[in-house]
Amino acid sequence: MPKVGMEAERRRSLIDATVDAIHERGYSDVTMAQIAKRAGVSGGLVHHYFGSKDQLLAATMRHLLTELGRAIRDGLAKAETPRERISAIIAGNFAVDQFQPAVIAAWLAFYVQSRTTDSNSRLLKIYAARLASNLTFNLRAFMPQTEARRIAEGTASMIDGVWIRQALSDAKTDRDAAIAMVEDYVETQIAAHAARGANA
């Protein structure tokens, strides 16, 4: 009889193998057989668990989104003010175990596949909406709703942009520099709004 938890372990090993294989070969060139070999399981088992490469990518993205959400929640649990919560959201989006070359490559594949795969598109829209909503809610402490929404979209765009630029670069990931770049944008926008209010 299979050990208790074996299926979960195999699924996780396949997801880890998918991330590594995409980083090494690119999503278009990697095959289910290569992923299975990397994970140390049979090709038939991959198809049994996930059905297709697109479904495996979707499962990988769900896993990464879960990990991303956990990192953000951990940061938010320690934050006491709206500004600290904004910083926690930003830092969570560059979590140490996420902002790594292999995971970045998987995220880039996710973005590309979301254009043609409904399941991936839905996941991306949920992620984007949650990020914008969380940022908007906390930015409202500094500005009206409409302005907060605009700055939230700008902040989310910067976060996504940093990830995409890193995916296209051979440079070593620099989490601190990435966070500082986004923080600078947010701080500048909050200060600019405060200055407009003071001059009104």
Image (spheres, rainbow, N blue to C red):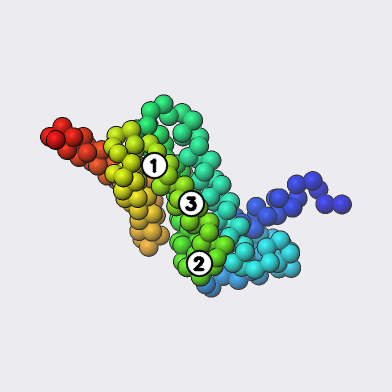
CA distance for labels 2 and 3: 15 Å
User: Is 138 on the left-hand or right-hand side of 52?
Assistant: left
Q: Relative to 36, is 61 above or below?
A: above
- What residue is pinned by disc 1? 135
Residue under the point 58% across and 60% down: 58
Q: Residue furthest right?
A: 1
Task: Judge whether residue 37 can be spotted in this image.
Answer: no
Quick check: marks 2 and 3 in contact, CB under 8 Å? Answer: no
Is label 1 in a helix, a strand or a loop?
A: helix
Q: Nearer the viewer, mark 2 or mark 3?
A: 3
Could you give the CA–CA distance between mark 3 and mark 1, rounded to whole angstroms?
12 Å
Residue at label 2? 113
In the picture provided, is 105 more to the left or to the right than 149?
right
Q: Position of residue 112 (x, y in %)?
A: 46, 66
* Disc sitting over residue 94 in the figure: none
Indicate the secondary structure of the residue bearing disc 3: helix
Residue 11: tell me if it is visible: yes
Asked if residue 196 lies left or right of residue 145, the reply is left
22 or 183: nearer the eye? 183
Quarter-of-image position of residue 18: bottom right
SS at mark 2 in the image: helix
Task: Check disc 2 and give the amino acid type.
Answer: Gln
Q: Amino acid at mark 1?
A: Leu
Q: Position of residue 71 (x, y in %)?
A: 50, 40
Disc count in the image?
A: 3
Q: Identity of the amino acid at label 3?
A: Tyr
Q: Is residue 81 above or below residue 31?
A: above
Residue at 45% of width from left, 50% of height from top?
129
Residue found 38% across the figure and 54% down from its top: 160
- According to the image, label 3 marks what residue? 127
Query: What is the x, y in percent for residue 3?
Result: 81, 48
